[in-house]
Amino acid sequence: MTDKHQRSILKGATWRVIGTLDTIFLSLVFTGKIGKALKIGVIELFTKILLFYLHERIWMRLAFGTEEKTVNGVLVKVEKHYRSLVKGISWRIVGSLDTFWIALFVNRGSEHAVQTAFYIAATEVLTKVLLFWLHERAWLNVKWGKEVTETKS
């Protein structure tokens, strides 16, 4: 089984809601300004949807952490727990870099812009790896958008 494009889009959108709320919260904690926190969250809403979609499509092509089994003539790809963890870490690197640059842009001109952007992005590493792993494991139970691949006998 593989994921259809529509599934990747919806999966990205659900993750983005969770991720954006987390970023807005962390941005508020470190800037103390709701306006800046919302601005960081809105900008990243758009950049991260595109980045997440690309990340998903790349990971779909990787066999790392998967095992193929044939069940009733249907080839099924089973994902191991460690794949979700490594995938979450790779996404977090991309996502935290994106957050850093956005937070730096929004806070430009501030005396502590680099420090604030770093704190937001670094804290995200902790919160979002866990949130992403939980999101990934939940989506493994969603059957919608899976494309069945027949095996040849």
Image (tube, rainbow, N blue to C red):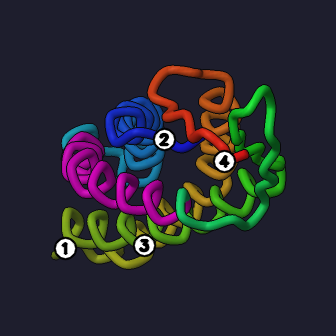
Residue closest to the eye, 126 or 106: 126
In three-dimensional space, the C-alpha distance between marks 4 and 3, rounded to whole angstroms, equals: 43 Å
Q: Which amino acid does label 2 sit on?
A: Asp
Q: Is residue 67 magenta?
A: no
In three-dimensional space, the C-alpha distance between marks 1 and 4, rounded to whole angstroms, equals: 58 Å
In three-dimensional space, the C-alpha distance between marks 1 and 2, rounded to whole angstroms, equals: 40 Å
Q: Name the residue under label 2.
A: 3
> Of discs 4 and 3, which sits in the foreground?
4
In the rendered structure, the answer to whether residue 135 lies left or right of residue 36 reads: right
In the rendered structure, the answer to whether residue 39 lies left or right of residue 130 reads: left
Residue 112 image offset from top left, x and y in percent: 35, 74
Residue closest to the eye, 123 or 18: 18
In three-dimensional space, the C-alpha distance between marks 3 and 2, rounded to whole angstroms, equals: 27 Å
Indicate the secondary structure of the residue bearing disc 3. helix
> Of discs 3 and 2, which sits in the foreground?
2
Q: What residue type is labelled 1?
A: Arg
The earlier-in-sequence mark between 4 and 3 is: 3
Indicate the secondary structure of the residue bearing disc 2. strand
The earlier-in-sequence mark between 3 and 2 is: 2
In three-dimensional space, the C-alpha distance between marks 1 and 3, rounded to whole angstroms, equals: 16 Å
Farthest-out residue, front:
153
> Of discs 1 and 2, which sits in the foreground?
2
Q: Mark 1 points at which residue?
A: 108
Part of the protein shown in magenta: 36-59
Q: Name the residue under label 4.
A: 152
> Of discs 1 and 3, which sits in the foreground?
3
Q: Which amino acid does label 4 sit on?
A: Lys
Q: In which quarter of the image is the N terminus?
A: top right
> Of discs 2 and 4, which sits in the foreground?
4
Residue at 36% in and 53% down: 53
Q: Which amino acid does label 3 sit on?
A: Leu
